[in-house]
Amino acid sequence: MSIRFVVGLLALAVLATILERPASGDACQYGHACAESEKDGRGCCPAPKVDAKKAADAKKAADAKKAADAKKAVDAKRAADAKQAADGKQAADAKQAADAKQAADAKLAADAKLAADAKVAADAKQAADAKQAADAKRAADEKQAADAKLAFDAAKAAATKPPPTGFACPTGMVHVPAGTFPMGSPSGQGGDNEHPQHEVTLSGFCIDKTEVTVAAYTRCVASGKCTPIRPKKDGFESLCNGARSDRQNHPVNCVEWAQAKAYCESASKRLPTEAELEYAARGTDGRAYPWGNDAPTTQRLNACDRTCRDLVKRLGVEGPMMYDGNDGWPATAPVGSFPVDGPFGAVDLAGNVAEWASDWYGAYGAGASTNPKGPNESNAYHVVRGGSWNANTASWVRGAHRGLSSSQTTGVGLRCARGY
Ligand SMILES: [Ca+2]
Ligand SMILES: [Ca+2]
């Protein structure tokens, strides 16, 4: 017998020993309890019976959980994706809105700038246009003023040309040469209607040396060129000279303006203008009265002296006197009774009767003028100048004093003028 054989025999003997060793309870495969009758020879319970329903439920539960987990995961992913998408959309929208706002702001700013630029340009153009217009207006005004001055100077030169060689005024008239004088009164002097004092240039003219007499007017009536005086029944008609044979050399009074005008025209003359009457009374030196600046006296004119005051008082009118004395005449005096020449030789330009001017009465203009003729528009009044026998204040017989009347009075007569 060989060694190998012997060893083999020994191994088999060991193995047999192991297999024959008795089983013990703690070596059972399954740990659950079972009936004694079910135990095998080693006292071990058989394999437990499988509970198919429980397993199926468990599996189902496991499957459900797995499915739920999967769904949850899917949902979570979907929600995450949705959120991401929403966030992306929100961000995109925000960006889009921001871009739109930026674009709008940029457009707004650009528009505003454009508008501002346009306004600046428009303002600049407007200013330039206004300046151009102002310059043009100024230039036009200057030209107009220069032209007007040239025209005025030319008219003045033409108006003030000397009389023809050898010219003489008709009998009974005095020559008043062309000239320029300050018409009206300086500010602060004289009546309100004597302002503004303004420069007047007159052509030379002839003016009656005296007021028109009753005799002269009566001759005109006889010739058919004048109408008879019709005294108003005002209580003073006894002082109208026309019906009095003893007053043929007194000034005609109670004469209407239209009658005075007709009388002058009958003699190829005209009524003097207001400016001519003032110039004839004052000349160029601005004197207050025809004789100068001394106050009126009984020696210088026929005005309302004591006898005049008494006369009018008898007729129902009480008033002051111009001077306390007797100038010789309670009412009118024969023309030329006070031979105190005015600057050009006419007499009675202050007092006796005031005299109709051709002008309608109106306010003075401020500008210089040549041969002014008064307002173009008619009104109720014509100008009378010089004051009269019933003037009871020195102011009324000043050369600048402006009287006015709408009809005949005992204190208004006339004298005539003519040009050449
Ligand atoms: Ca008198
Ligand atoms: Ca007079």
Image (cartoon, rainbow, N blue to C red):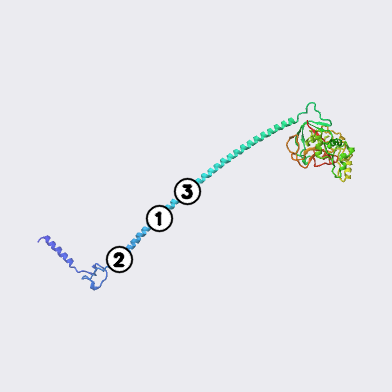
Residue at 43% x, 52% y is 89
Q: Secondary structure at mark 2?
A: helix
- Residue pushed farthest front? 224
Give the quadrant of residue 124: top right
Q: Nearer the viewer, residue 63 or 104?
A: 104
Q: How far apart are the two marked residues, 1 and 2, measured between alpha carbons?
A: 37 Å
| Mark nearer the N terminus (1 vs 2) | 2
Residue at 36% x, 59% y is 71
| Mark nearer the N terminus (2 vs 3) | 2
**Can you identify the residue that label 2 sits on?**
56
Residue 300: assigned label? none
Residue 82: assigned label? 1
Disc 1 crowd rating (10 Å Cα; few below 14, some 14-19, many 20+) is some
Residue at 50% x, 47% y is 105
Residue at 47% x, 49% y is 98
Q: How far apart are the two marked residues, 2 and 3, measured between alpha carbons?
A: 62 Å
x then y, percent, for residue 242: 86, 39
x then y, percent, for residue 20: 17, 68
**Can you identify the residue that label 3 sits on?**
100
**Left or right of 260, for residue 66:** left
